[in-house]
Image (tube, grey):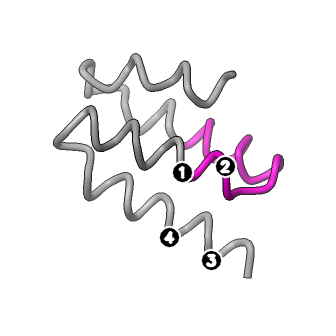
């Protein structure tokens, strides 16, 4: 079940990536709900996902805190 939550989080983040504020809001929710190991996996995925999305780079701070 935890894997399903991580996959769901990635799907949601992909769908809201058009809006940096909404993306940050969903990322905050994800960090509060996921397990520490899942957060680490999400962090790695996020770094690759936002490579070509400079407007989302500031959101990395939310996951590193």
- Separation (CA) of disc 1 from disc 4: 12 Å
On residue 50, the disc is: none
Q: Which residue is mark 2?
A: 32
Whole-angstrom CA distance, mark 1 to mark 3, is 15 Å
- Magenta segment: 30-45
- Foreground tag (1 vs 3): 1
Q: Which residue position is annotated with label 4?
A: 8
Point out residue 42 in the picture as x, y percentages from the top left corner: 61, 46
Q: Which mark is residue 4?
A: 3
* Residue bearing the label numbered 1: 29
Q: What SS does tag 4 mark?
A: helix
Mark 1 or mark 4: which comes first in sequence?
4
| Mark 1, other Cα within 10 Å: few <14 / some 14–19 / many ≥20 | few
| Callout 2: SS | helix
In magenta stretch: residue 4: no
Residue 50 picture quarter: top left
Give the crowd class for mark 3: few <14, some 14-19, many >=20 residues within 10 Å: few
Q: Disc 2 or 4, which lies upstream in sequence? A: 4
Circle nearer the viewer, 3 or 2: 2
Q: Name the residue located 51 percent from the left edge and 24 percent from the top edge.
A: 60
């Amino acid at each position: 079940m935890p894997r399903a939550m991580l996959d769901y989080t990635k799907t949601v983040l992909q769908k809201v990536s058009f809006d940096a504020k909404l993306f940050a809001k969903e990322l905050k929710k994800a960090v509060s709900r996921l397990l520490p190991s899942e957060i680490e996996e999400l962090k790695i995925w996020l770094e690759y996902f936002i490579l070509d999305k400079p407007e989302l780079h500031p959101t990395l701070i939310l996951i590193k805190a």
